[in-house]
Image (cartoon, rainbow, N blue to C red):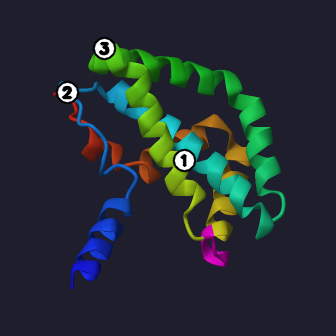
Amino acid sequence: MIRILVLLAIMVFSAQPVLAQVKVKRCLSEAEIKTEQLVRHGIFLRESGNRCDEYNPGTAKMWKDFDANVGTRFAQQTAKRKKMFEREFKTKALEVMTYFDGRLVTYYRHYPLGIAYCGNIEKLLKDVTKKGWNAFTVQAETIQNEVRGDYKVCK
C-alpha cells in the first residue's frame, strides 16, 4: 500500500514541469507573461525537435534553422525574462531561473516519444519555418498557456 502511495505521489509531482516551481510573490505584466511563454515555447520546440529527429528526420535541422533566423529575438526575450526574475527573486534570480529551465528541459527530454507527438512537433516546426516569428508567438500563447496559472497576472 505504501509503495502504491509513493508511486502515485511521484506520478503526480512529475506530471507537469511547473508543479514544484516557486510562486511569484508579486504580479507579472501581460508583456512579461508573453515573454515567459515565448521562452518556454523555445525550450519546448528545441528539446522536442531534437528528440523527434529519430521519428521524423529533419526536425532537429528545422529547429536549428529557425533558431538561427530568430536568435536575436530569442536573446531579447531571454534578457527581458532575466530582468523579471531579478526583480521577483532578487538575490536568487539566477538560481531560480536555472531551476525553472532545468525542470522544463528535464520534462521535455524525458517525455515519451511517439508517432503522433513527433508528427505534431514536425507540424509546429514547419509552421514556424514557413511563417516565422509571428507564427511562433501564436503557438507560444496557445501551447504555453499554463504560464497564466504559474504566475499572478497584474490587473
> Where is 149 relative to 14, above or below?
above
Alpha carbons under labels 2 and 1: distance apart? 28 Å
Q: Which residue is mark 3?
A: 90
In the rendered structure, which segment of residues is drawn in magenta? 113-117
Q: Which residue is mark 2?
A: 154
- The image quadrant where one finds the N terminus is bottom left
Residue at the farthest front position: 2
Measured from the top left, where is residue 81 in percent x and y?
44, 23
Q: Is residue 59 left or right of residue 147?
A: right
**Label 3 SS:** helix
10 Å neighbourhood of mark 1: few (<14), some, or many (≥20)? some
User: The residue tagged with tag 2: helix, strand or loop?
Assistant: loop
* 36 in relation to 112, above or below: above
In the rendered structure, which disc, 2 or 1, sits on the residue that comes first in sequence?
A: 1
Measure the alpha-carbon separation of dots 3 and 2. Answer: 19 Å
Residue at x-position 53% and y-position 39%? 137
Quarter of the picture holding the C terminus: top left
Rendered residue at 80%/40% (across/down): 65
Residue sitting nearer the eye, 25 or 130: 25
Whole-number angstrom distance, CA of label 1 to CA of label 3:
23 Å
Marks 2 and 1: which is nearer the front?
A: 1
Magenta-colored stretch includes residue 118: no
Q: Is residue 66 left or right of residue 7?
A: right
